[in-house]
Image (cartoon, rainbow, N blue to C red):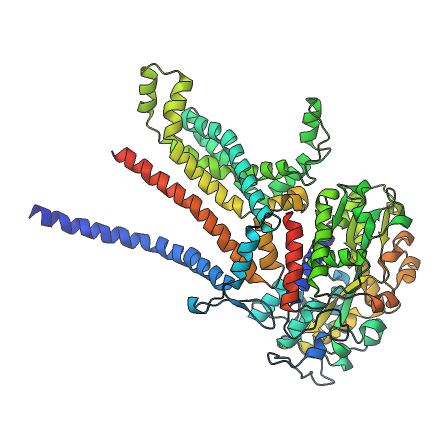
Amino acid sequence: LDSRFTRRQVIGGSTRLGLALAAGLPLLQACGDDDSGPSSAAGGPDSRRDTTTIADGLSPEAGPLRIFDYDAYVAPDIVAAFEEKYGVKVEITIFTSDDEAISKLASGAVETDLHKSAGTSTLFKLIESGLIQPLNKTYLTNIGNVVASLRDPYYDKGGAYSVPYTVFGTGIGFRADKVDPASVSWETLWNTEYKGAASILDDVREGLSMAMMRKGLTDVNTGDPAVIKQAGEDLSELTNLMNIKVEIEGYHTIPEGVTTVAHTWSGDMLGALQYLPEGTSSDVLGYWLPDPALVNNDVMCVMTKAKNPVLAHLFIDFLIDKTNAVTNFQFVGYQPAIDGVDGQSLIDQGLVPENLRSCVLSSDQIGKGYRSLQLTPDVEALWNEAWSKFTAGG
Amino acid sequence: VANAAGAAPGGHRNGFWGFLSAPGVAWLIALFVVPFYAVAAVAFGRVDPILRTADPVWSPLEWNFSAMSHVLDRVFDPDDLGAAFIRTFAYVGGALALCCLVGYPVAYYVARYASRWRGVLLAALVLPFWISYLMRMLAWVNLLQVDGYINRVLGWLHLGGSRQWLNGSWPAVVIGLAYGYIPFFILPLYAALERLDKRLIEAGRDLGGSPARVFRRVTLPLSVPGLIAASVITVLPMFGDYYTNGFLTSGSPRTEMIGNQIEFYLRGTSQPQTGASLVLILSAMLLVLMTYYLVVTVRAQRSVAT
């Protein structure tokens, strides 16, 4: 339980930091143009991207394979199986946020072979600063297992530099014994019946996007000052109306009964099962995911200065093996971005209860989900200021 | 000849003591002056075009003040960052008052009446430092829960035992701050009270003053410099605190302090200039308190000298 607690906390923090930090890259487009991903903006005047892959057919190095990762974000059984298969040691160095990871990798404070869990918005920095190398897919024999919608993702054209690791959406986790599941929507967070027992994610992009989606807006990367300001004011309304909490603790406060409705990530509600008091049925948990939802994923990438680039490729390939992905899911709780590992298959295997089916995204949901794109510095400043005003409680 | 003979050793001694102070000066320069200048270089600097991390500008001639100017506008807006500043000052003021109420009698007792138990009591005062701040705050979370001991005691006393202390409640933050920092208050105050000239108190008694009157007219005025020193040492870290309210109110906007906003901008955004500007503004405000402390201290020293 402790390891899961730590991992969920850092995922929350990393998403918050990653989305905010990556926002503002000068080469990027804002305003919801889904075709204007980072890769399409490559080759700007400041770009230092690496374009050389390793050669085909190389033998694995002697190791040890060095991995940079969140704490407890890969199953120990999977690591042990990889060590046994290739006869090498795996050394994992921990970071606690995307910000910290970028800072340590850029400064050279950490030298690693595989950055296993970069945020999609952080990825652009890693590519353009030349910190990661393009992948040689001849080593990725399981690449066909990745969900179709993320094989050519918006954040990395053709998946040239990255392979998706986990995927999650944003919705509302709730106590099904206190809230009618059929009535749940974003409006539930403004329902005074749950005053003092509601929370929203401590995340600039997630929080303001939720306020925009509540009003029926779909451009969650808008640069319109009026829209951003209104979203901030709508959130400020929650301060006194709902005595809202701004946190990422829904995965344990909901099962503990402290929170009744919480703006949460889908993976957190699957993790909530671990925090149910003894004797409490999992039926008390519920999750509502809008359609389309805001969707995010973490990615794996190989460092340009990797001493064991072949092993790093092979470890990625090992994780996207279907059987290994399901084994890994049982430990980390977040859904792998693997084709066929959907709600029904996980329910059939007894890994996800029927009432939390909506926590597992289908390939279609992943494909059509809204994405938080990187913003220009000026637009990011507007988002930060709206959020800052809300959290300052003015 | 006598003067000349005496001057040489004196000058030698000054050089010796000056040499001994060198490590302290180097420490101050390395860990205060340089970092403080670095904060200014970030506040008035640039960001890396790709990594969006701080790119400090070291030459004041190239500093850009636009971020600071915008932050100042927001700080003086009570519907914006001004709210967090006002709340921070109110919470720190409340916590300091609580420290005075609880800490002064403790420090006074240990300094004046503890006699052979003094060592044990001083060790007990330092004891909280042996446990991490995180653990102590988590303990308060348990105490302040709806079904926690605080509410149970209040229930037994028929004072209402169902209070939601952790639900965005300011008393929880004030109590947490006072508890977390009170050792910083008691120890310097104890040192000051322990040095009080007891003959002055005895003189007050001899002149017919009641214990309460002697305390009010003699002891309390004499302990003002110690109180101010203890207050300054206590409130400085309180102003920068950003985790106590996070623990005790689950990130409620009702209890947001300025430290939370600094953390947000420095660690959660690609606007380090805004975070560094807030640090400088808060430092400027604290400088006023420090100046007041220095003025009072100098006046007290002069009054003793005369």
Which residue shows up at 69% across the image and 83% down it? A54
Q: Quadrant of residue A163?
A: bottom right
Rendering coords of residue A360 (x, y %): 85, 60
Rendering coords of residue A89 (x, y %): 68, 68
In the picture shown, does residue A374 fall above or below A389? below
Furthest residue in direction top, as rendered: B208
Q: Quadrant of residue A197?
A: top right
Which residue shows up at 32% across the image and 24% down it? B200
On the question of residue A61 being in view, the answer is: no
On the question of residue A231 being in view, the answer is: yes
Which residue shows up at 65% across the image and 73% down it? A126
Q: Quadrant of residue B248?
A: top right
- The answer to whether residue B70 is left or right of residue B13 is right
State the count of labels.
0
- The answer to whether residue B245 is left or right of residue B232 is right
Furthest residue in direction left, as rendered: B1
- The answer to whether residue A244 is left or right of residue A385 is right
Q: Nearer the viewer, residue B29 or A23?
A: A23
Q: Nearer the viewer, residue A170 or A253?
A: A170
- The answer to whether residue A165 is left or right of residue A89 is right
In the picture shown, does residue B98 fall above or below A285? above
Rendering coords of residue B142 (x, y %): 68, 37
Furthest residue in direction front, as rendered: A226
Rendering coords of residue B99 (x, y %): 51, 34
Q: Nearer the viewer, residue A302 or B120?
A: A302
